[in-house]
Amino acid sequence: MKKNLKILVTACGTPGFIPLFKQLKAIKERDIEIIGTDMDENASGRFMVDKFYQVHPASDNLFQLELFDIIFNEKPDIVIPESSLEIAKIAAMKPQIKSVNGCKVMINDYRVIGDVEDKLSLYEKLEKADIPIPKYFTPYDLDDFEAGAFHLGYPSKTICFKPCVGKGSRGFRIIDAKKNDIDILFKERPFKPYIGMDTFINMFGPSEQLPDMLLCEFVEGTEYDCMILANDNSDALLVTVKIREESKYGLSSKGVLVDSPYHVEMCKKITKELGLKYCNGIQFIGDKVIEVNPRLSTYIYGDDFCEPYIAIKMMLGELTDSQIRAYQEKIPIGRKFIRTTDQVFYND
């Protein structure tokens, strides 16, 4: 048996936590104690973890102080952040966290996270590296917005916009001239991200500055979610590619692992270009990069194939680069997943 581990996972109420928890607890070569934190005292993970702490939201100044106190007292071997809302705050704490018995943090450097989460910065870096991305504009006001829409082919072509810095599809909307406001209201499901051009224009004054956003061509095609495991030198050692077969509420709800050499090689290039480390997700539609998530995301696990655990062993120095690269041949191609819901019953 290898040395037992204590792992702290933040935001243990997120959709990806429960399958991660089950996979780590199923590891046979060692016992793993899992501590969970969340701002919700009744987060789903609370009822599974070995120990739970409620913390303030990441937007609160107390969040970092509370998290460091927990790390100082519990002395975990590794901290795994699960929420996009927390990763920048935790990345800024990496030197302090490391001072607690050499605790490791499965997160990118603070600067890298800032560059990746700002979609304008991300697209500019990818464009300079000759990596395919959607056509885009950065409109200042409504005149810019309408001119950009015209250059992107609207109204004959569908367009979309998103905030330069946003989380979980917040602010993402699609403008399709074939759908009017009445159709959007009565025929589309509430979580479909459509908005009418006139509705958008009426939200702002003629000379009012728009929020920082990207106005983009609406790219359609097969959606690929790629998970990357990279070392400290930003070498992508293991890349898994899955097709997103269905999405709900902005989350992948059905998918299948596929063999796609193009996306594997492109992910290696992007990882090096952006300076990514550890576990990251890159989303493509067809051959174009849509966004990069600098954290753990949705995995398809297989027998003896748990990417976060491989990352843990890498960070602990238990696996070499060549040993991790060998996992590329062990990817359970064809394995599928379906995201399901469950219930927890408890008494206060």
Image (cartoon, helix red, strand yellow):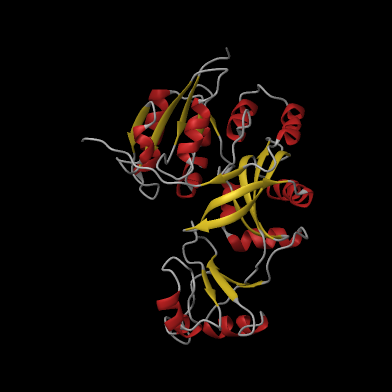
Q: Vertical placement of 289 versus 181: above or below?
A: above
Where residue 30 sits: x, y (%)? 54, 17
Total count of labels: 0
Instruction: Indicate whether 37 appears above or below 117.
Output: above
| Front residue (pair 231, 189) | 189
Query: Quick one: which residue is furthest to the left in this view?
Result: 348
Name the side, left or right, on which 298 lies relative to 129. left
Q: Residue at x 68, y 67 (%)?
A: 134
Give above or below for 244 relative to 308: below
Query: Residue at the location (40% across, 33% down)?
Result: 36
Query: Residue 133 lies in what quarter of the image?
Result: bottom right
Report the residue at 68% width, 35% height from top. Answer: 232
Residue 112: x, y in percent? Answer: 61, 48
Residue 106: where, in percent of width, then height? 56, 35
Instruction: Decide if residue 216 is in sight here.
Output: yes
Residue nearest the viewer, comparing 103 with 288: 288
Can residue 96 be seen by looking at this rendering?
no
Q: Residue furthest top?
A: 1
- Residue 262 coordinates in the image, percent (x, y): 78, 52
